[in-house]
Structure formats: structure tokens, C-alpha cells
């Protein structure tokens, strides 16, 4: 069985960490149902990685989404973790957990770092805070492109990380659900999907059908009609290639050590 982890990072528009928090816009969040309706029509379950800022501002919307989707943590403020250290990271997680617990009467299980910037200390913190899985690590990337979130190779399927090097397999309790792309590391993310012709993905799937894939969208992908159309097409391709769509929780149950 081939598995595709479907996720959306739900955050302020375009996710810039430096933007003054008061000036941030949330049009993508307000229009997120445009993406979720595509999921609904195709019977797809997914995980929404939500910032605390969104959770606080759109509590009722998130509660509604929680009926059909898994709600997970994307930190409170969407600061990049290569710029902040220990205490500040802890606050970014604690504040989120507190509000989540208050709304859902249970702690969040999944985490994704803004811009995929996670390191060993960050992973340890997540484990201490009781997260069951992280989904930040990008295990490969096209050689002709640079991306700050790509830090070198890692396993292409879910794995338990090594405490000394989270890009290797090890004994940590937390499960890493990586974000592998298609052939050559071409990512299945909204920005790439909208730039590449849909045919190129069709072609890639003829060459290779990985056992595990992660489709990673952003709330602000909902702002472009063209992007929405292409997301729909990618989902259809994945379905035709026999991928089963799973939430992070479901993947966790399947891949975690006994
Ligand atoms: Zn983000």
C-alpha cells in the first residue's frame, strides 16, 4: 500500500516570520475552506498544522475543522527556530499546548517547525513536551535549488530519529514523518505544483511511485485559483496511482515502534 500524508500549514499569509505580528494578514485562513472543500469532495483526511496565533484568532473555525481533520502544532508565532533558542522555543510550544488543551481537552500530538527548521535540541524539546510525531524534516531536495529548510539527506519514510543526529535512524520515542517529494526530490508543495506543469508530475509518477509521500500545502495556497485547480489535479493523480491519504496520527499508529 502506498501512503500519502496530506498536510496544510495554517498560518498568516505567506508565513514570513519577521513580519510584525499585529500587521499580519489571514486571508488564506479565511479562505481555507476552498482547499478543504476539494478534500471533502475527494473524501480525503488530512492534518492541519496550525499556529497558535491562528488558533487564538479563529477558534471557532478551527473547532469546526477539527471535526474532519487532525489539528496539530505549527508553533505559536511562526518564528524560525534557527533564530531562536531554548527558552523562547519552549514558550512557543507551551503557549500553544495550553490553548489547545483548553479547547480540545487533550494535548496536540503532532508538530511541524516553521520553514522545516528543526534541530536536535528542538526534537528533544518536542519529545519532552509529549508530541508523538514531528513532520519537519525534508529528506531530499532538487540539486539545482536551495531551500533553508533542507539540511541534507534523511530517510524517505517515517522513522525514529537518533538523538545525536535527527537525520539518522535511532532510538528516540518521537516519530519523524519526513516530507519527501517526488523523483529527484521535487517537492509536492503548493508553490512548486503551481509552477510546474501538471504533466511533469504525471511523467514523474510514471518513472517512480515512492511508497511514501507528503503533500504539503499552505493556507495561502487557497488565494490563487490556478493553484487550487492544480492541487485538485495532483490529488486525482495520487488517487489514480493508488495512494491512500492518511493523517499524521494514522501514520503514527502504523509506523511507531511497539
Ligand atoms: Zn509555516
Image (cartoon, rainbow, N blue to C red):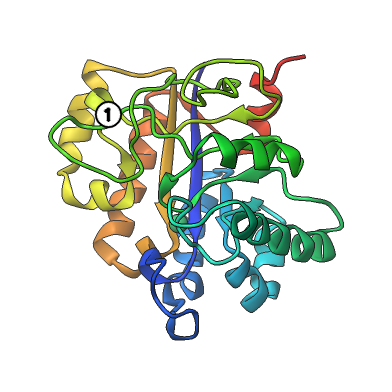
* Residue drawn at x 50%, y 23% as measured from the top left: 165
* Residue drawn at x 29%, y 67% as measured from the top left: 224
- Considering only vertical position in the picture, is 243 above or below 111? above
Indicate the position of residue 62 as horizontal and vertical percent values: 66, 66
The foreground one among 220 and 143 is 143
**Would residue 223 appear left or right of 112 to someone viewing this image?**
left
Regarding residue 109, the answer to whether it shows in the image is yes
**Would residue 68 appear left or right of 29 to someone viewing this image?**
right
* Label total for image: 1
Regarding residue 247, the answer to whether it shows in the image is no
Circle 1 residue: 185
Q: Residue furthest right?
A: 105
* Residue drawn at x 45%, y 65% as measured from the top left: 34
The quadrant where ligand 1 appears is bottom left
Q: Secondary structure at mark 1?
A: helix
* Residue drawn at x 72%, y 66% as measured from the top left: 63
Q: Please tell me in which quadrant of the rendered image residue 13 appears.
A: bottom left
Local crowd at mark 1 within 10 Å, few (<14), some, or many (≥20)?
some
- Considering only vertical position in the picture, is 23 above or below 74? below
Image quadrant holding the C terminus, namely top right
Indicate the position of residue 145 as horizontal and vertical percent values: 17, 39
Q: Residue furthest bottom?
A: 22
Amino acid at each position: 500500500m502506498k501512503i500519502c500524508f496530506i498536510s496544510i500549514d495554517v498560518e498568516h499569509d505567506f508565513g514570513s516570520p519577521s513580519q510584525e505580528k499585529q500587521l499580519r494578514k489571514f486571508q488564506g485562513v479565511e479562505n481555507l475552506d476552498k482547499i478543504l472543500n476539494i478534500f471533502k469532495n475527494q473524501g480525503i483526511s488530512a492534518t492541519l498544522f496550525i499556529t497558535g496565533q491562528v488558533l487564538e484568532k479563529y477558534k471557532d473555525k478551527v473547532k469546526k475543522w477539527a471535526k474532519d481533520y487532525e489539528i496539530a502544532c505549527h508553533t505559536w508565532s511562526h518564528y524560525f527556530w534557527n533564530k531562536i533558542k531554548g527558552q523562547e522555543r519552549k514558550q512557543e510550544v507551551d503557549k500553544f499546548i495550553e490553548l489547545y488543551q483548553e479547547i480540545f481537552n487533550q494535548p496536540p500530538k503532532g508538530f511541524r517547525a516553521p520553514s522545516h527548521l528543526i534541530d536536535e535540541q528542538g526534537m528533544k524539546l518536542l519529545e519532552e513536551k509529549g508530541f508523538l510525531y514531528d513532520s519537519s524534516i525534508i529528506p531530499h531536495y532538487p540539486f539545482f535549488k536551495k531551500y533553508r529548510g533542507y539540511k541534507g539527506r534523511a530517510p524517505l519514510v517515517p522513522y525514529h530519529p537518533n538523538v545525536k543526529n535527527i537525520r539518522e535512524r535511532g532510538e528516540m520515542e518521537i516519530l519523524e514523518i519526513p516530507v519527501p517529494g517526488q523523483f529527484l526530490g521535487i517537492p509536492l508543495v503548493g508553490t512548486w505544483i503551481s509552477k510546474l506543469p501538471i504533466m511533469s508530475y504525471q511523467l514523474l509518477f510514471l518513472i517512480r511511485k515512492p511508497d511514501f509521500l507528503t503533500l504539503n500545502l499552505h493556507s495561502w495556497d487557497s488565494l490563487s485559483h490556478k493553484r487550487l485547480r492544480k492541487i485538485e489535479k495532483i490529488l486525482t493523480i495520487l488517487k489514480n496511482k493508488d495512494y491512500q491519504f492518511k493523517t499524521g496520527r494514522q501514520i503514527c499508529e502504523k509506523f511507531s515502534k511497539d
